[in-house]
């Protein structure tokens, strides 16, 4: 695959960010919203996670890298088998490591898969009382 230009990477970043924006509501706040980095965190006070009390939890993030756009998907840590089983196989092929998807192209199918993943993650956080 040819190397992506900065312009192509920004196009991918902006397309995915547009899909993420509707989740910036209620306790879900943008922790970073700068060119090349966008992160959403839930800032609900007194969240209990694995017996520990917290006041924040990462939700999803987007970072412009030199050869891809990283889509960070923290909900995969909540109950990874259940969450990951609800993600598309095409999206899972882009998963590098535990929670980072390397996005190198954006089309209708990948955006649909990302939207579905965010919906699944939001439902998981909601079911756990973290939103």
Image (cartoon, grey):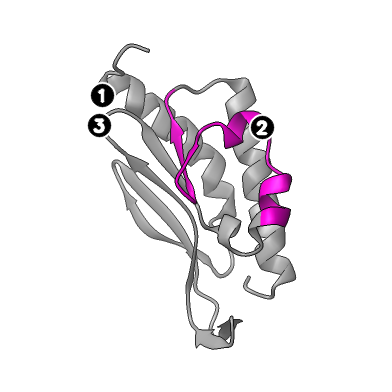
Judged by depth in the image, the label closer to the viewer, 2 or 1, is 2
Q: Which residue is mark 1?
A: 6
Judged by depth in the image, the label closer to the viewer, 3 or 1, is 3
Q: Residue at x 29, y 21 (%)?
A: 7
Q: Which residue is mark 3?
A: 66
- Mark identifier at residue 89: 2
Report x, y in % for residue 6: 26, 24
- Asked whether, in this view, residue 124 is left or right of residue 29, the answer is right
Report x, y in % for residue 54: 49, 83
Mark 3 vs mark 1, CA separation in Å = 8 Å
Judged by depth in the image, the label closer to the viewer, 3 or 2, is 2
- Segment tinted magenta in the rendering: 81-104
Q: Nearer the viewer, residue 46 or 49?
A: 49
Q: From what the image shows, is residue 50 above or below residue 65?
A: below
* Sequence-wise first label, 3 or 1: 1
* Sequence-wise first label, 2 or 1: 1
Q: Is residue 43 magenta?
A: no
Q: Is residue 100 magenta?
A: yes
């Amino acid at each position: 695959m040819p190397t992506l230009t900065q312009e192509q990477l920004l196009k991918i970043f902006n397309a995915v960010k547009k899909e993420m924006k509707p989740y910036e509501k209620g306790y879900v706040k943008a922790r970073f919203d700068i060119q090349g980095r966008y992160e959403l965190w839930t800032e609900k006070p007194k969240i209990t996670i694995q017996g520990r009390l917290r006041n924040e939890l990462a939700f999803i993030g987007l970072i412009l890298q030199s050869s891809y756009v990283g889509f960070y998907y923290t909900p995969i840590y909540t109950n990874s088998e259940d969450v990951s089983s609800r993600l598309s196989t095409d999206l899972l092929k882009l998963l590098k490591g535990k929670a980072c998807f390397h996005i190198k192209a954006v089309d209708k199918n990948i955006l649909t898969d990302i939207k579905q993943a965010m919906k699944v993650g939001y439902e998981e956080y909601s079911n756990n009382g973290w939103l």
